[in-house]
Amino acid sequence: MRPTTLLRLALAGTRTDTARVVLTALSALLATLAGLAALTVLAIEKPAGDAWEQSEQYRNALLREPGLRGGTAFALLMLMVPVLALAGQCARLGAPARDRRLAAIRLAGATPGQVTRLVVLETGVAALLGTLVGLGVYLVGRDLLHRPDAQARLALPTDVLPSTGALAGVVLGLPVVAALATALMLRTVTTSPLGVSRKAARERGPGPWAGLLIGFGVVSFALIRPVVYRVADGQMAGRLVPLLFAVGALAAMIGVVIGTGWLSYHCGRLLRRHARRPAALLAAGRLMADPWAGSRTFAALLAALIFGAGAAAQRAYFATKDQIEREQSRLAGADGAANPFYLSTMDLVDGAIAVAILIATGGLIVALVEGIVARRRAYAALVATGVPRATLGRSVAWQALVPAVPAILLALTVGTLLGRGLVADVSEGGGSTLICEAPAALCEDPATRDQYSRIVYYPAVQRAVPVPLEHLAWLGAGALAAVLVTVGVGLLFLRASTALDELRTT
């Protein structure tokens, strides 16, 4: 098969296939923007001077201070997680129709390898279109947002540009990763002229071994503080801390996502044992038949919640630290004004988390609609046998909410444990200060300053960081609202997917 023919077949299809290509390209565009933004922050050159020399051409301290740029870039990269998960959900859109199209191509004489290359090329081309458009948006936006203020300071690092190799790595690397991931997912798929078959689903439920990954992630974060304070070799600590942070966060996220499959299966068992209504029994059977559907569906949302709960623990730490500093400042006779830098920085982090949850909601909608459309013949058969559509609607709601609630609680708990592993308490050393209780003229005169001055001692303080229950409640409520919105959108597609004409669909 010639490359031009392969490309033409990859871009052919129905409106559903076009929607899948467009959504995949959009996901690649968003991931490209996040990756290029992170690389731009890392491309800021350190000015000449000592290690603490700041880049004064920026207004935001996150860009001015060299020590804060790594965390800023990491937060931007974390936005790629829900975007890539959205891309994975979009790749499954219209899967039954695509399977029939691939079977027809096999019937026309294509080999299994050519069919696999066809699917991989479709994903790669769609991702490449998205990354190229993302690069164009990045370059145009860089010129449009380059607006220095009266002090010649910039709001964004529009005066720097990542290297050509870094730009090419993002623009070309993301499509390659998408194509490789597609090839990996197709390793258990066999395409024949009679259709597409996959390995049979496992008959027993998933094991609880995901808890080992979660425990490993929590322990890794708990070891970061001892490594920082007790490892004498600074270079060794500098290598261990990022490794513990990255490996621990990845292990915890994978554990929560995989653990959702275990939760789905056992929630289905409990629901089947105790439920008495048809909708709940239908949902229980579906949860037990495919427990991994919850892991696939909620992966991006759970990752955003873990990151959000960890950020809430960090905010609680900064708030406690700021409160102690203001108390000691008032004891020293100062005004006790708060330092808003860290808390305002956490506001930016919360904004990034809100964007991640919004993107994850889009992935939830795509996944739920895809599941309803893929099972439309089964739903139509149930309607034909007398099952009311309202019962099917309640079944879809049960199927989405039953695993979502414990999974959300698990993600918030794990994220909080990770955050508290880094900052469980705040310690401020005691000290003393000299206070002059007189007008400025008397305090500035050496002859009279001593008789109006006194030494104020303030004690050392160690205070436990409170659990941010209110912040966690808002995160949980937002995630649950996202699931409810997803269910509402899915129910709009349910009526069309339960038409009796679907029984004639091949």
Image (spheres, helix red, strand yellow):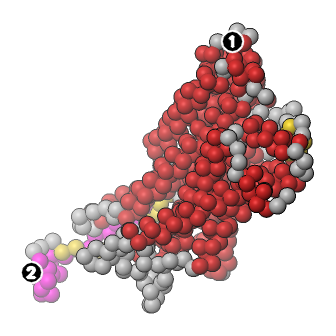
Quadrant of the drawing holding the N terminus: bottom right
Extreme residue in the top direction: 386
Residue 97 visible to an observer of this rendering = yes
Dot 1, how many residues are within 10 Å of its Cα: few (below 14), some (14-19), or many (20+)? some
Q: Position of residue 79 (x, y in %)?
A: 55, 57
- Dot placed on the residue nearer the N-terminal end, 2 or 1: 1
Dot 2, how many residues are within 10 Å of its Cα: few (below 14), some (14-19), or many (20+)? few
Q: Can residue 152 be found in the magenta stretch? A: no
Q: Which image quadrant is residue 100 in?
A: top right
Residue 387: give its label. Answer: 1
Question: Which residue is more in the foreground, 19 or 419?
Answer: 19
Quadrant of the drawing holding the C terminus: top right
Residue holding disc 2: 441
**Going 70% across and 39% down the picture, which residue do you hit?**
94
Residue 78 visible to an observer of this rendering = no
Q: Can residue 462 be found in the magenta stretch? A: yes
Q: Is residue 240 above or below residue 287?
A: below
Question: Which residue is more in the foreground, 364 or 334?
Answer: 364
**Going 76% across and 22% down the picture, which residue do you hit?**
504
Three-letter residue code for mark 1: Val
Q: Position of residue 333 (x, y in %)?
A: 24, 67
Q: Is residue 61 above or below residue 473?
A: below
Question: Which residue is more in the foreground, 340 or 111?
Answer: 111
Decide if residue 231 is on the left or right side of residue 458: right
Q: Nearer the viewer, mark 2 or mark 1?
A: 1
Q: Which residues are magenta?
A: 440-466
State the separation of the CA atoms marked 2 and 1: 90 Å
